[in-house]
Image: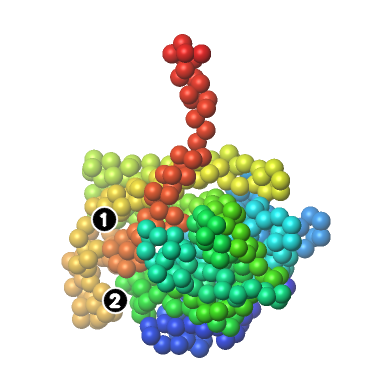
């Protein structure tokens, strides 16, 4: 079963996993319409393998065995492998209306990190799980961010010891873990969840230096789905969020047993930081890759609504569009350069994106995103929040009035639909979700600045300055 169909993916989710949504237990994800939207959106990662237009990008044939697998599970060895991976992520996100699918992207990010960091028996376990995911075409989430409690205190210093995931028992058969992770994307509709450390650990935090994988229906595992963007949506008012959604959870481990073959790190604080940062090297590259359709849409929507409003030739509009183009293409260029500048891990031969350029791309996207939103809204106008809704447009009595008074350089329907696209993207809760992701997803702005500084080698620049100053 190296390539699953969307139907097979859907069927796999009805396995008794413990889910809560809006205060109630969810027995069947597909039976709740607003949750089903998220599952169907995620299935894009399976649909592309069946579509002749994308098959060459989405499917990878192992040259040794001849078997075909999802290209997400191709271990990168070269710059071209990373460029291809970026293009696949960008393509699936574009098909997803600017919302990343993530059910294979993030899990493979985590697997690549494990394969690079681990050694000995833990590495063999990670290899076995990687091969299982590749052969089963599984959807895999990553739970990294602990709930953390008081951020001024480390894991072992918290008033409640469960605010970071920890090992509470260890036997010949495996370990028992307790605690919670938050901001866990797509865990509700994945097959497995990989747990990774969230930070560096000291000797006193040994119980918290843990990494493992569990099936999403593991006994004692509970997922509490965020109600953000709750409710069913009509496509006229919400052209994006009515079809595209990602579920986030508080993921709670209530004394979950993990057998040793699924344990990758246990009470080894000296390895926690490296594993956390190695995952980030891949996942921030995934992040900037899936932002590319979003920055393209900002340019396209701003230009289209300016034409429809009849202001495309105004000097200040051209200036705003130019700024949006420069923003989009700077993020794209840095993303591609991160792959072109790829580095090869000497021990494993696995390629990884250049951390310096990856973090520059993510920082550029995050720090200029809100300015870009302002530019798009300025091109559009106040109809983003004062325009009519789907019920008005469907009314035989009201619609002729709207068609008369909302026409401009384009018919009213075209103009209102473009306005609703921009409103959904920038002014409604889907837009708010994107805005928060820009700042916090895959690491904060401060984390990106810190990693950029750490990744830069100042030696050549310092030596050049000293030579020209006559100091050497």
Residue 50 in the figure: left or right of residue 374: right
Where residue 81 appears, as percent x and y from the top left, is 65, 49
- Residue 68, picture quadrant: bottom right
Residue under the image location 28 percent in, 59 percent down:
410
Tell me if residue 234 comes above or below residue 67 in the rendering. Answer: below
Residue at figure coordinates x 51%, y 69% from the top left: 165
Q: What x and y, as percent, mark residue 395?
A: 25, 81
In front: 330, or 190?
Answer: 190
Horizontal side, residue 73 vs residue 33: left or right: right
Name the spot of residue 2 as percent of width and height, x first.
72, 69
Q: In which quarter of the image is the N terminus?
A: bottom right
For the point 60% across and 63% down, the residue is 267
Report whether residue 81 is seen.
yes
- 95 is higher (above) or lower (below) than 388: above
Q: Residues within 10 Å of mark 1 (few under 14, many from 20)?
A: many
Q: Residue 377 carries which label?
A: 1
Residue 390, numbered circle = 2
26 or 326, nearer to the observer: 26
Left or right of 119 in this view: 295: left
| Residue lying furthest front | 204
Colouring scheme, one of rainbow, by chain, secondary structure, one colour: rainbow
Of labels 2 and 1, earlier in sequence is 1
């Amino acid at each position: 079963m190296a390539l699953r169909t969307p139907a097979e993916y859907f069927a796999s989710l009805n396995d008794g996993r413990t889910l809560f949504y809006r205060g109630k237990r969810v027995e069947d994800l597909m039976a709740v319409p607003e949750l089903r939207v998220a599952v169907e959106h995620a299935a894009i990662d399976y649909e592309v393998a069946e579509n002749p237009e994308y098959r060459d990008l989405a499917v990878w044939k192992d040259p040794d065995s001849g078997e075909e697998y999802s290209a997400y599970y191709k271990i990168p060895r070269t710059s071209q492998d990373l460029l291809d991976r970026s293009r696949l992520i960008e393509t699936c996100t574009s098909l997803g209306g600017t919302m990343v699918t993530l059910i294979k992207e993030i899990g493979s990010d985590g697997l690549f990190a494990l394969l690079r960091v681990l050694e000995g028996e833990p590495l063999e376990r990670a290899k076995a799980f990687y091969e299982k995911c590749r052969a089963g075409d599984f959807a895999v989430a990553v739970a990294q961010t602990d709930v953390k409690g008081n951020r001024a205190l480390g894991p072992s210093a918290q008033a409640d010891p469960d605010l970071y995931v920890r090992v509470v028992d260890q036997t010949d058969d495996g370990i028992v873990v307790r605690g919670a992770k938050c901001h866990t994307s797509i865990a509700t509709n994945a097959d497995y969840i990989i747990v990774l450390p969230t930070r560096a650990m000291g000797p006193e935090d040994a119980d918290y230096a843990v990494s493992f994988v569990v099936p999403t229906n593991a006994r004692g595992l509970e997922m509490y789905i965020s109600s953000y963007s709750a409710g069913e949506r009509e496509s006229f008012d919400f052209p994006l969020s009515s079809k595209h959604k990602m579920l986030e959870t508080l993921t709670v481990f209530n004394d979950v047993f993990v057998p040793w073959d699924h344990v990758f790190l246990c009470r080894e604080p000296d390895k926690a930081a490296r594993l956390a940062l190695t995952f980030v090297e891949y996942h921030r590259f995934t992040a900037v890759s899936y932002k590319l359709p979003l920055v393209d849409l900002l340019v396209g929507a701003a230009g289209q609504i300016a034409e429809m409003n009849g202001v495309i030739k105004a000097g200040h509009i051209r200036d705003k569009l130019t700024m949006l183009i420069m923003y989009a293409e700077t993020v794209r260029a840095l993303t591609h350069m991160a792959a072109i500048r790829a580095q090869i891990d000497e021990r494993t031969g696995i390629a990884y994106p250049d951390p310096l350029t990856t973090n520059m791309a993510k920082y550029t996207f995050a720090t200029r995103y809100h300015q870009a939103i302002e530019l798009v809204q300025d091109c559009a106008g106040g109809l983003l929040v004062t325009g009519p809704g789907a019920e008005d447009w469907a009314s035989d009595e009201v619609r002729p009035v709207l068609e008369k008074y909302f026409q401009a350089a384009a018919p009213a329907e075209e103009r209102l639909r473009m306005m609703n696209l921009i409103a959904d993207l920038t002014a409604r809760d889907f837009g708010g979700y994107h805005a928060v992701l820009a700042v916090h997803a895959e690491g904060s702005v401060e984390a990106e600045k810190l990693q950029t500084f750490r990744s830069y080698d100042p030696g050549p620049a310092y030596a050049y300055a000293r030579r020209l100053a006559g100091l050497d």
